[in-house]
Structures are given as structure tokens and as C-alpha cells.
Image: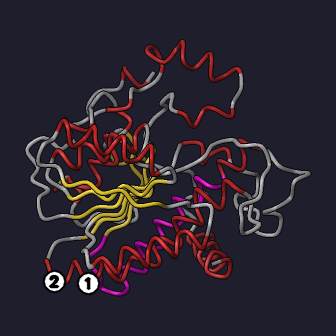
Amino acid sequence: MWFFIGKGASGFSANSTAEEVTQGIDGSGLTAIVTGASSCIGAETARVLALRGVHVIMAVRNLSAGNEVKEKIIKEVSKARVDTMELDLSSIASVRKFASKFDSSGLPLNVLINNAGVMATPFMLSKDNIELQFATNHLGHFLLTHLLVENMKKTARETKREGRIVNVSSEEHRFAYREGIRFDRLNDEEGYSGRAAYGQSKLANILHANELARRLKEDGAEITANSLHPGTITTNLFRNLGVFEVVASRVNKYFCKNIPQGASTSCYLALHPQVKGISGEYFSDNNLAKPSSRAADTDLSRKLWDFSMDLI
């Protein structure tokens, strides 16, 4: 059980909260985008970053829900700098519109947390005719990162502060389809599995971060890219799992992390000086972790990169 795991090399553990791992860190002068920031660990990530002085852009699909969270944060943290912007990651047009609007704002970008996601949905295609979980969890974030990375490079050069890209993956990446990424059968409804498709998208999150880290290093950019498992949290991601949602809500306090604990590794990777210069790694419980062998496959990460570029 996660609650029996002690502190790791970082000095933090599965029990650590987002506030605890960022205690004493001054994030003033930084600007961060957090996707999926209108609920659950995304909202907590936005709140804690704002608490540490970061200017937070909440990238949300539902502006009404996002503004409610924004007002709660400002009520708690009077000096918080928080803005909401609309973003539907399942739509290539929406991602491009968001990135264009952000660049037009003239804001710098130090931190990008690719957090939003859907889980174990019935088979559906996105507006761009791409399997929904792959489109939302991977491709939307891949495109968003691609469109914003030049801003991040410029910000890092001008401020002389390391930029950080954080992909929220999951241990479910170990339960992707047998072949890992179904390049030739991405939209195959007949062989579709909600859980395997989710695992595929989470595997893609790790592969994306790894290949991005390699390319950024090659370019000499002062930006790191890492991925993480937030832990098992009973969030609204479980809404498509039917009866499990009811069971999960009952065993939550015994077997799952709470939301402040679930948001901790994202905040740790975004702000903590311990991870300065560390890139292309996978984290869990605020410590380095080992992903599956497939997630560490450099040939697969390159193939996914090229495949994703073709799709966008």
C-alpha cells in the first residue's frame, strides 16, 4: 500500500502534499500554464503554484468551472495572479487558438504542466477523427507543447531561469495495448479497450517527454521535460468506470491518495530546486521511478514523435 512507503531520496513520499513539497519556494516572476485546472489535481496544482507566487494560466475546457476555481484561489490567496483561458485538448483547432492567444498576450512561459485527461471512455472519435483518449491525453498536449516551446526557450534565455515541462502520465501506461502504440489501428473500434487505450495515451505521455527532453538537450535549450505518475486518486476521471466509481469512493480514504497528495509530484517537478537540470525522467511519489521498458524505448519515442507530427 502506498501509505506504507517511507520517504525517498528527495525527502518526500507518497504522503507528501503539494504544499509540503513547495514549502519555502518563491515562484514569483514565473508564469505557468496548467491544463485541466478546473478540477481535482489540476485545480490543486494551480492553487499551490499561485500560493507560491506563480502567475498561473488555467487552461480549461469549461470556463465557468474554471472561473469558479479561480475565484476560490483568489479568495484564499489575496495576492494570487490567476487567469483562465479556454482550451479543448481534443480539438486541434482549439489548441492552435489557445496557443495563438497566449502568444499574443506577450506573457512569458516558464512552466507547462500537461495535466488534463480523460479515462477509459467508450469508443469515440475526436472532432479531428482521432480516438478520443489518444487525441485528448497525448496529441492535444503534444501540439500545445510544440506551439509554446519557442516561447519557453525565449523566456529561459531572457530570464536565465530553467523552463520546465511536466507531463502527467500514470502507472496505467503499463497496461497499454500489447503493441504499445497502435500506429496502424489507432481508430480500430472493433479491437478497442477503454483501459488499454488509456494506457496507450499515458505511455505516449512518457515517450513524448523523453523524446522532447532529448531534442531540447540537442538544441541546447535550458528547458527540462519529465513525466510522472500522480498516484491512485478517486477523481472524476473514474466517471466512466461504472460501478467502480461507487466502490472507489468508499475505499478512497484507505487505499487512495487525496487530491493534495496527488498534486504533489506535479508541483515538485514544476518548482523544486532538487530537480534542476534533470530531464527525460519518470517520477512517482516525488521521487525518481522506473517506467516500463516500452516507455524507455528510444526508437518508439522517435516513431511516436514523427507519427504525432504527421497528425497535427
Q: In which quarter of the image is residue 194?
A: top right
**Spot occupied by residue 120 in the image (x, y as percentages of width and height):** 69, 41
Seen at 26% across and 31% down, the residue is 7
Seen at 36% across and 64% down, the residue is 165
Q: Which amino acid does label 1 sit on?
A: Lys
Residues under numbered marks 1 and 2 in contact, where contact means CB atoms less than 8 Å apart: yes
The residue tagged with tag 1: helix, strand or loop? helix
Q: Which amino acid does label 2 sit on?
A: Glu
Which residue ends up furthest to the front in the rendered image? 64
Seen at 15% across and 41% down, the residue is 77
Is residue 173 on the magenta stretch? no
Residue at mark 1 to residue at mark 2: CA–CA distance = 6 Å
Seen at 48% across and 18% down, the residue is 252
Residue of label 2: 158
Q: Which stretch did the figure color magenta?
A: 200-223
**Spot occupied by residue 32 in the image (x, y as percentages of width and height):** 28, 61
